[in-house]
Image (cartoon, grey):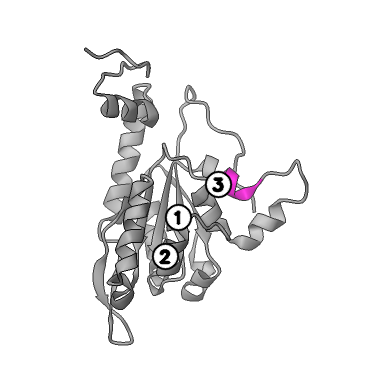
Amino acid sequence: MEPSSHAETSPSVPREKFHVLVGVTGSVAALKLPLLISGLLEIPGLEVKVVTTERAKHFYNPQEIPVTLYSDEDEWQLWKGRSDPVLHIELRRWADLMVVAPLDANTLAKLANGICDNLLTCVIRAWDLHKPLLFCPAMNTAMWEHPITAQQVEQLKGFGYTEIPCVVKKLVCGDEAHSLLQELLPRIKLVQIQSSFLSNVGLTVESLEWSWSHGRSVDHSGKREKGP
């Protein structure tokens, strides 16, 4: 499988679709992946692709995912020689927004420590930090309450990623788990609207963030103006 385009879209050329890349990991909450994708596809103007870990495949039927689905095997099938595209870089370029839902405890630990040993973690390690990345932790309550979990969540937030707070669910085993989705679709819609607004007025997320952090204004051409 290949991304639909290897070239970045020129900011002067309007694009019809907002690109959302969904990452899914090996939490039982991955059972909800078909529902998440269906909900995303109901939002006008979105194009969605999915990157899955191998363990996540245990929890959903790929036939129920009506969008392009990438896994580790695709990374190696796409690259045959030095001039070939690298899938995790192409996906990083394609996406306007990444959503990791669910984010299991194992992948959370990998991301917090910079480990990139599969397609999903390589995409995130190469992620453009000027683009939004949302992550939705999902794990058993005993794992969630371990002190290292809070440290790792804060580490991801320190990278500039946005946590979607989890909610408590009852597991089949009788234990409780912390999971996701309650706030996810509205948040993605908000990011889409914000991105469309910035594009329409000629701004970039980078220039807007620069103006906020420096207390200065930005004109509609995206040029940085001097403050007082």
Q: Residue at x 29, y 24 (%)?
A: 211
Which residue is at the front of the view, 67 or 227? Answer: 227
Mark nearer the N terminus (2 vs 1): 1
* Overall secondary structure of the magenta section: helix
Choose the circle earlier in sequence order: 3 or 2: 2
Q: Is residue 112 left or right of residue 145?
A: right
Residue 226's disc is: none
Q: Is residue 119 left or right of residue 114?
A: right
- Farthest bottom residue in view: 173
Magenta stretch: give its range.
86-90
Instruction: Decide if residue 154 is in sight here.
Output: yes
Quadrant where the image shows the N terminus: bottom right
Residue 206 drawn above or below residue 131:
above
Inter-mark Cα distance, 2 to 1: 9 Å
Image location of residue 166, percent across then percent down: 27, 64
The structure residue drawn at horizontal position 75% and vertical position 41%, both measured from the top left corner, is 83
Q: Nearer the viewer, mark 3 or mark 2?
A: 3
- Name the kind of residue labelled 1 in the image: Val
Relative to 101, does residue 82 appear above or below in the rendering? above
What is the secondary structure assignment of the residue under circle 3?
Answer: helix
| Residue 69 seen in the current view | no
Percent from the top left, x then y, of residue 39? 35, 57
- According to the image, label 2 marks what residue? 33
> Alpha carbon of mark 3 to alpha carbon of mark 2: how far?
19 Å
Is 216 in the magenta?
A: no
Q: Which residue is mark 1?
A: 22
* Amino acid marked by disc 3: Leu
Q: Residue furthest left?
A: 228
Residue to which mark 3 is pinned = 91
Whether residues under marks 2 and 1 lie with C-beta atoms below 8 angstroms apart, the answer is yes
Dot 3 alpha-carbon crowd within 10 angstroms: few under 14, some 14 to 19, many 20 or more: many
